[in-house]
Image: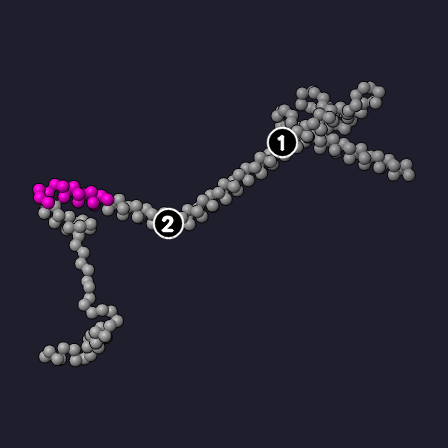
């Protein structure tokens, strides 16, 4: 039983030493000077860990370092670990915020593209109508200028009738035979016969 108890004590001490080494490495990489971090290997002498007696007034364990002779306590290492975790959390939040902003920008861009795609035919038709209206106005202005330059009103009216749609002559055809009447049916029969015009030969 004593042998098992001794082995159990050795395993516990080794586990505690490994935990201290890991904590010291995390603190060295996270918050302490560069010359301390740049060392190729960080070897901790397990014999240098000293527990302070309860009556000595110190409540924490002191851990020596090899960078500048300064001694860091477990509380210092815990504080360094906490600051490291805070920085990691802050970096994650910034990355998440950046991703959300990028996603929102992509969504807004897609919505704008869809709106432009739906409105493109109407905008093209409106631009075409505006261009035709502008061309018509310029044409009418040039005709009005030419009319005002004519010496007589007759020549001005002739030019206006030839060039301006507003003054052109309009011819309306009025048929002498009413639609859907007997005369219209008779004319259709005559035009559809093979002997069209034979009476007049």
Quarter holding residue 198: bottom left
| Quarter of the rendering occupied by the N terminus | top right
Left or right of residue 183: residue 92: right
Mark 2: secondary structure: helix
Residue bearing mark 2: 122
Q: Residue furthest left?
A: 151
x 24%, y 69%: residue: 179
Circle 1 crowding by C-alpha within 10 Å: few under 14, some 14–19, many from 20: few
Which numbered tag is attached to residue 55?
none
x 16%, y 41%: residue: 145
Query: Do the CB atoms of the residues marked 2 and 1 lie less than 8 Å apart?
Result: no
Of residue 11 and residue 182, the one placed in the foreground of this image is 182
Estimate the x, y position of residue 129 in percent, counting from the top left.
30, 48
Residue stretch rendered in magenta on the structure: 137-153
Estimate the x, y position of residue 127 in percent, counting from the top left.
32, 46
Of residue 176 and residue 48, the one placed in the foreground of this image is 176
Estimate the x, y position of residue 37 in percent, counting from the top left.
64, 28
Of residue 135 and residue 60, the one placed in the foreground of this image is 135
Quarter holding residue 190: bottom left
Going from the N terminus, do you reach mark 2 or mark 1 first? Answer: 1
- Residue 138 in magenta? yes
- Kindly report which numbered mark, 2 or 1, lies closer to the viewer in this rendering: 2
Residue bearing mark 1: 87
Mark 1: secondary structure: helix
Left or right of residue 42: residue 55: right
Circle 2 crowding by C-alpha within 10 Å: few under 14, some 14–19, many from 20: few
């Amino acid at each position: 039983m004593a042998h098992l108890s001794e082995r159990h004590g050795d395993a516990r001490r080794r586990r505690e030493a490994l935990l201290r080494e890991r904590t010291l490495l995390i603190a060295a990489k996270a918050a302490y000077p560069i010359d301390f971090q740049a060392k190729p290997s960080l070897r901790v002498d397990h014999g240098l860990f000293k527990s302070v007696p309860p009556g000595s007034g110190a409540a924490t364990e002191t851990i020596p370092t090899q960078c500048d002779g300064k001694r860091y306590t477990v509380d210092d290492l815990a504080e360094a670990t906490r600051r490291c975790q805070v920085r990691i959390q802050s970096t994650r939040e910034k990355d998440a915020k950046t991703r959300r902003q990028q996603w929102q920008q992509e969504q807004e861009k897609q919505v704008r593209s869809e709106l432009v795609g739906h409105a493109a035919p109407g905008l093209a038709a409106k631009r075409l109508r505006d261009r035709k209206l502008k061309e018509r106005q310029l044409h009418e202005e040039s005709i009005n200028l030419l009319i005002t330059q004519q010496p007589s009103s007759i020549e001005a009216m002739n030019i206006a009738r030839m060039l301006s749609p507003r003054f052109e002559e309009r011819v309306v055809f009025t048929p002498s035979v009413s639609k859907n009447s007997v005369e219209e049916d008779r004319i259709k029969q005559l035009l559809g016969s093979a002997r069209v015009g034979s009476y007049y030969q």
